[in-house]
Image (cartoon, coloured by chain):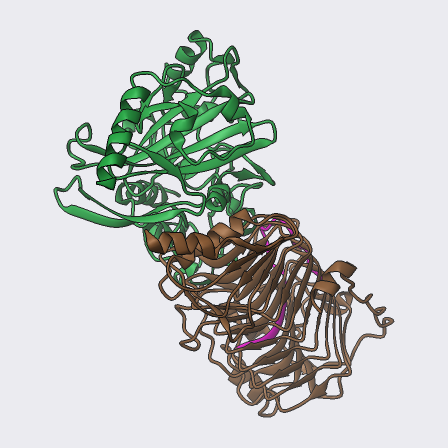
Chain colours: A brown, B green
Amino acid sequence: MQAAVIALMATAHVQAGTLRVEPGDGAQERLQAALIEAKPGDTVDIGAGRFDLTDGLSLDVNGVTVKGAGPAATILSFKGQKGAGEGLLVTSDDVVLRDFAVEDSRGDGIKSKGADRIVYRNVRVEWTGGPKETNGAYGLYPVESTDVLIDGAVVKGASDAGIYVGQSKNIIVRNSTAMYNVAGIEIENSYSADVHSNLAMHNTGGILVFDLPNLPQQGGHAIRVFSNRVEKNDTPNFAPKGNIVASVPTGTGVMVMANRDVHVFSNIIGENGTTNVMVVAYQSAFNDKNYDPNARNIVVRDNQHGRAGWAPAFPGGAELAAALGGSFPSVLWDGVGGAAANVHLKDAVLTVTLNLPSQGAAISLAQPAAYAPPSTPPAKDLPTILMPAAMEAAAK
Amino acid sequence: MKRAVVMAAAWVGLVSASPSPQVNEALILSDALPPRLQDFGLLVDGKTPAPGVVPYHLNTPLFSDYSMKFRFMHLPKGKKAKAVGDGLLDFPVGTVLIKSFGYPADMRSPDKDMHILETRLLIHRASGWVALPYVWNADGTEATLKRAGQRMDVSWTHLDGQKRTISYAVPNANQCKGCHVSGAAMTPIGPKVRNLDDGHQLKALAQAGLLSGKPQAVRPMPVWDKPETGTVALRARAYLDANCGHCHNKAGPADTSGLWLDWDQPADTNLGIGKRPTAAGRGSVGLDFAIKPGDPAASYLVARMASTEPGIAMPELSRSMTHEEGVALVSQWIREMK
């Protein structure tokens, strides 16, 4: 009874607009109650310390800021989680998440769905046991949202993608670190994204731009990947089989699949055993007439390349490398779609097309050859992605 | 001493409340979030309705850890719900849908020693539907609002004569919306014409003056565990509709998965046939397809229904046990699928 009284006091409004929650007894109920009782404009201020949580948390109030004392100080631990699919779920608009950590959630770390104008700032999601197939899928998982800003996040150990933005529009992922995930950063079935100034290291694949069939939003396009460091992506693929990222070869830097208008430029990409940049079509069979499986209107330019291609980690990779004189190229296109695909690979490194005849063709049909960019005019630069001013202010 | 006073007060409250509490229509229509369920005057106890509150049942219900459910509806005086096609009844503002959850001491004698744990209200107010979860005290004399949810250990003797103990989760208000949402708006799930039409129920509601429109479904859902009500395929589809389709549909919380399991979904890739996992993580459990015709063991839809592990288990909420009989039905459907 006494604990209950203290718990009530601990979630009381300490000042107008701020609900403060400290660790201790009943943290699950107190923190969830604060997330339910918050009014638009309020801040849920989570104190320093470790919160041992048994169930997923959720926020469904517009315009709420959830703020901790820093990603090393305020730790929401889901090690003992008994239910729900993610650590924290946000389903409301204009939410700011900043300065806290989510650890060891059983499913995804932080998911936001249909949550427009969301800011993730200085948050950490980590599976503390290192890369494991039993880790949750995504660290940060905004989906079906317009205006997504991820700034200064750190994600480690996701069994799918560390930072994953899916079926969304107008996206920035910047100044973030993704390590020891299967995919470091993944933009999937999304429109208009800038992925820049991030570090993607020791993942299976560093930065992926994918599009998949049979989904409500597809036709991913207008994605810029620039000024990132994509290095030493050397963690053996630990994704559960069946997932699309389970097919990403260990040692992939940047991978573009089934998107149009993707520009990869001014990155530092190196020490990736399979290849630094890979541009490919969707490979599996599909029956979706609205889906375009090919990569097209792709530009790869002005990247600084380190070593690549000494250990191509996919079936037939070693044979292909042998056919190419022992090493796999730094930049690779599967060649699907031919000249009409308008693929401009312009870095001054070994660049190869596999000349595959069609989507889904077996790798044994490859006729690898050095690639010369087409004579078609290079694609125009894509516009810089801008966020509403209030979001940039919240990310200061 | 203090406890004795509290108990006496509860006893007085109980006596004064029975036999027939008055439904508080003004409270239903207000913006209030009453801390006590009794304030509404909807129930005599967890499974006994007050006058003017009507029980109803579904052909195929949602599985919630083998709990027994008691469903009631209250319509504002003089108002009717309207049957529109096979979908959700169109309920007037002022409607309350009531569902109590409980366990008997022994599932083999479900009518004896029922222990009601919680009562959930869905109230149709002018501003939309509101979900309020109430948790009963150990004596079953009072239920208090728990918007942040609660976990509690529950034990009973199961159908096989073995004792079961689970950590029962009362959902928080957001988790209510986690299922009860279509687009951005909160909505009831269960009382759809197709799932209410057992040949009698809708007609009885119409005769009682509570229902307008056609009291009959074009394609009624069968009773999932009564073979005489439908083929394996129809009963499996009914089961999926009731257990999965409220999230897994084109406008539901799981729309982005592209796996749509509602009653009207055609038997195509989006029903899961030959569909690869999307954003499933370890929920793929190493399998390539949601449904692989003829091979339930290679279908991750089945594996996720059978799992109790958070992050894999589906549905994500209200389930810590495997519904063996439901898994068996869906497996049989997939096994017989060409």
Q: Which residues are magenta?
A: A204-221
Percent position (x, y) of residue B6?
27, 36
In magenta segment, residue A212: yes
Q: Residue furthest front?
A: B1
Q: Quadrant of residue B2?
A: top left
**Residue A143 point in image, percent of width and height:** 60, 56
Please tell me whether residue A224 is drawn above or below residue A82 in the rendered image: below
Residue A266 inside the magenta-drawn segment: no
User: Left of B285 or right of it: where is B275?
Assistant: right
Q: Is residue A50 visible?
A: yes
| Residue at image coords 58%, 68% | A163
Above or below: residue A95 compared with residue B337 = below
Residue A215: where, in percent of width, then height?
Answer: 59, 51
Residue drawn 54% across and 83% down? A312
Whether residue A29 is visible here, answered yes or no, is: no
Q: Find residue B308 and report its horizontal and vertical position in percent.
A: 32, 54
Q: Residue furthest left?
A: B161
* In-image side of A376 versus B283 (left or right): right
Instruction: State the predominant SS element of the stretch in magenta.
Output: loop
In the image, residue A386 above or below residue B237: below
Q: Is residue B174 or residue B143 the one in the foreground?
A: B143
Q: Nearer the viewer, residue A304 or B173?
A: B173
